[in-house]
């Protein structure tokens, strides 16, 4: 069965960065890629991703990786804290 030309395909080992809040195009790509393995989070620019370790929240700037096993993993970026 052939996939439609408009259907996005991603290989295992692919990674997408969580975009900033105003980047609608890349948010749409991220939601399409994650499918049912993700849900939105009330805070801005965050997504909850289903991983083998359980649900993980990824914020803008974090990387979401699709491993060879077919599981998603989240690589968090370093965040500065307000003092």
Image (cartoon, grey):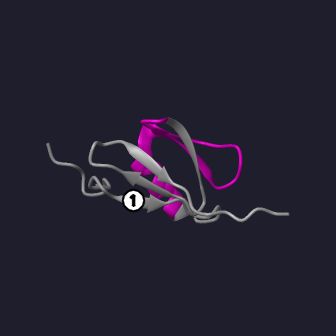
Q: Nearer the viewer, residue 24 or 39?
A: 39
**In the image, farthest residue toward the right:** 83
The local secondary structure at tag 1 comes to strand
Q: Nearer the viewer, residue 47 or 68?
A: 68
Residue shown at the point (57%, 63%) measured from the top left: 61
Q: Position of residue 48 (x, y in %)?
A: 56, 42
Q: Position of residue 49 (x, y in %)?
A: 51, 42
Residue shown at the point (42%, 42%) measured from the top left: 35
Q: Is residue 54 above or below residue 58?
A: above
For residue 3, side relative to residue 75 (left or right): left
Quarter of the picture holding the N terminus: top left
Q: Residues within 10 Å of mark 1 (few under 14, many from 20)?
A: some
Residue 42 is covered by the magenta coloring: yes
**Image mark count:** 1
Residue 63 is covered by the magenta coloring: no
Q: Position of residue 64 (x, y in %)?
A: 46, 54
The image quarter in which residue 57 lies: top right
Where are the magenta residues, as a range?
Answer: 26-53
Residue pointed to by mark 1: 15
Residue shown at the point (82%, 63%) measured from the top left: 82
The image quarter in which residue 16 lies: bottom left
**In the image, farthest residue toward the left:** 1
For residue 3, side relative to residue 22 (left or right): left
């Amino acid at each position: 069965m052939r996939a439609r030309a408009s259907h996005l395909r991603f290989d295992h080992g692919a990674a997408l960065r969580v975009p900033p809040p105003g980047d609608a195009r890349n948010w749409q790509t991220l939601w399409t890629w994650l499918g049912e393995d993700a849900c939105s989070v009330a805070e801005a620019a965050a997504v909850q991703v289903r991983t083998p370790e359980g649900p993980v929240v990824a914020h803008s700037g974090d990387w979401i990786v699709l491993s060879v096993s077919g599981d998603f993993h989240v690589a968090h970026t370093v965040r500065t804290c307000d003092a």
